[in-house]
Image: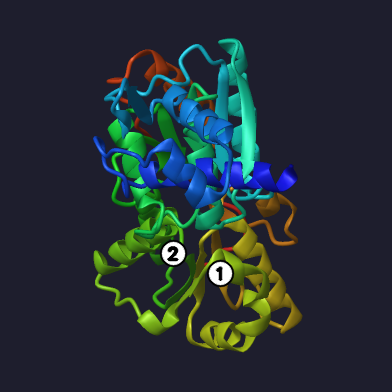
Amino acid sequence: MNGQKLKAGAFYENLKSRIVTGLLAPGTKLPSETECMEAYGISRYSVRKALSRLEEEGLIRKKQGKGCFVYQPNRYRAGEGSKQVLLIASRVENFYFLKSISGIENALSEKGYTLTIKLSNYDSRIEGELLCKAFSGHYAGLLLFPSESAYLHTNLHLYRYIEERKIPCVSLGNKLCSTDIPSVTTDDYTGGRMAAEYFVKRGHRSFACLMNQEEYSGCMRYAGFAAGLHERDIPVERCHILWFGHAEIDSLFREEADNILRLAERTTAFFCFNDAAAVNLYRLFVQNGVRVPEDVSIIGYDDSYLCEINPVPLTALHQDPETAGYIAAQNLLRLIEDENYDCNKVFMPYLKERDSVADI
């Protein structure tokens, strides 16, 4: 019996995935019930149950005497009437995510909505599976903390599906590369330029960066930083830029310690992707006799509590994820009511001065 259920589930998931990903185009006729039974080794009842689910989700249409056909209406309807919003996030320990949740829940509860959270663990494959399940229509809308947002990765077809079906969806924290899915973000390009401007104002002329290459925000922070230096005729040394991904962050300051310390000998200032990276950098320097800010200055990004509790309080670019979360959820609810509502919102960061940058 369990084996039969597994096979029936596989039939449903496989067929749904092929429709959602576009392998089965609108208008394509599906195999007959008998053909499905033979191909998957399941009962006629299981085939009909799976097809009924797909029809309820708006993915197929049954035509009397002709069979079942792939169908994609212009407007997402399966979640209408639902009071649940699905949030797909990377990991819960992410500072931006944790602070955003409070704002999101406040905005949703004001309108009688509840929040369901699913985690992708920075894995685009898991994120894709969660998106496919979200298309079942149990949710009124989606909030995304996208993984690998800087990449043109394997979930692009699912983001396109969201756009084509007009599924209410807002990306938070990062803009999704190569999509028009609305987003609520910080102007990270401007934040990077602010960091460069501040370092130069304090007399610095040689720099290093620790940046996340997988996140759109990381790419924009670096791009803004580089632009800020170019505007002041200061060259950007590519060998001074250390890129990392989420899978590498835990080992970065062990495996790249010697490289980072050599950079500290050739530069006077480090711009970090976020406060967590800045704090880890500070600890590495302290352990190896490098003084902050006397020998090397540091600027972080987020302006989280980590900056305040660090032995040398860290200067950082400030962003407000709680307000961003509130606005993102509020805009999503408006999008549910009006598919043409413009949900995009960009917040301006500002520099919070503390003690980690010295004059030279």
Residue 20 coordinates in the image, percent (x, y): 38, 42
Query: Do the numbered discs 2 and 1 sit on residues whose CB atoms are within 8 Å?
Result: yes
What amino acid type is highlighted by mark number 2? Phe
Helix, strand or loop for disc 1: strand
Q: How crowded is mark 2: few (under 14 residues within 10 Å), some or many (20 or more)?
A: many
Tell me the quarter of the picture where residue 346 sits.
top left
Residue at the image position 52 percent from the left and 56 percent from the top: 125
In this image, 321 relative to 337: left or right? Answer: right
Q: Can residue 356 be seen in this view?
A: yes
Which mark, by number, is residue 297? 1
Which mark, by number, is residue 57? none
Question: Sequence-wise, which precedes: disc 2 or disc 1?
Answer: 2
Residue 227 coordinates in the image, percent (x, y): 28, 63
Q: Could you give the CA–CA distance between mark 2 and mark 1, rounded to whole angstroms?
A: 9 Å
In this image, 68 relative to 251: left or right? Answer: left
As displayed, is residue 344 above or below residue 197?
A: above
